[in-house]
Image: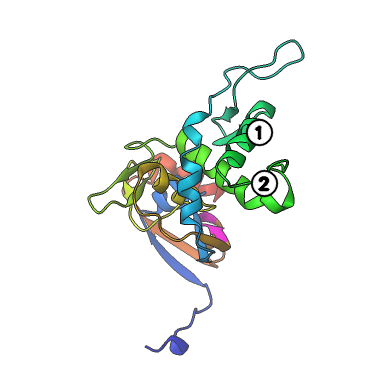
Amino acid sequence: FRNEDRVQRERFFAVVDEVDSILIDEARTPLIISGPAEDSSELYTRINLLIPHLQKQEKEDAEEYRGDGHYTVDEKSKQVHLTETGQEYVEELLVKNGLMEEGDTLYSPANISLLHHVNAALRAHVLFERNVDYIVNDDGEVVIVDEHTGRTMPGRRWSEGLHQAVEAKEGVKIQNENQTLASITFQNYFRLYEKLSGMTGTADTEAFEFQSI
């Protein structure tokens, strides 16, 4: 078929194989339409070299205590945040390496891209572990491991520069970054169908949850 001959029919009826995996285990997994972003692979590599200089703060700053760490970790939301000390130290490193003008701040509008790369590199180093969250295959590609099933997911890539940051961390070829143009979860997509059915050999254990989908 030619591209112009391909159409999306109205979403009336669908049959989903392994329906418990798709609608429950991967309910929050987003389906993403992405497009190419500006190539910044060199910047990922340069920022990656700075991250090992940073230290985790084991205790939050408080009025009676000021930690010496450079970042704090929120394991639940999988986020890393620079402390005030960390921001100042990162700014020193960026200036020293010619990535930022002296006297400038990381949070100025002109440095949004730098902040994006620093945050992605921090997350890659602190929150994502090789052979747990991803593997590096024989072709030198970073392949995501599904946190629910433990299966690899070839072709899937983390967004917001995280995948590129992990590639820089592992010293493999950095693929071009994509930007998210549209996103919807599996569960929300299949809710667009008027009628939905599915097949699985383990439906009974999830029967109650199926009723609420």
Label 2 close to label 1 by CB (< 8 Å): no
Main secondary structure found in the magenta portion: strand
57 vs 11: above or below: above
Using residue 75 as the reference point, say whether residue 164 is left or right of it: left
- Can you tell which mark lies on residue 87? 1
Q: Nearer the viewer, residue 111 or 153?
A: 111
Eyeballing the image, is 3 above or below 82?
A: below
Q: Where 176 sits versus 82, above or below?
A: below
Is residue 107 one of those drawn in magenta?
no
> Which element type, helix, strand or loop, lies under badge 1?
helix
In the picture, measured across the screen, residue 34 lies left or right of residue 150, that is: right
Circle 2 residues within 10 Å: few <14, some 14–19, many ≥20: some
Magenta residue check for 186:
yes
For image coordinates 53% across by 67% down, the residue present is 193
Q: 10 Å neighbourhood of mark 1: few (<14), some, or many (≥20)?
A: some
Residue that mark 2 sits on: 101
Is there any visible trace of residue 127 in the rendered image? Answer: no
Amino acid found under the numbered disc labelled 1: Gln
Q: Residue at x 52, y 72 (%)?
A: 11
Amino acid on which the number 2 mark rests in the picture:
Glu
Front position in the image: 60 or 21? 60
Q: Report x, y in % for residue 157.
A: 43, 54
State the image coordinates of residue 34 (x, y, percent, origin top left). Answer: 52, 65
Q: How is the image coloured?
A: rainbow
User: The magenta stretch spans which residues?
Assistant: 183-187
Percent position of residue 132, x then y: 35, 36
Say whether disc 2 or disc 1 marks the residue closer to the N-terminus.
1
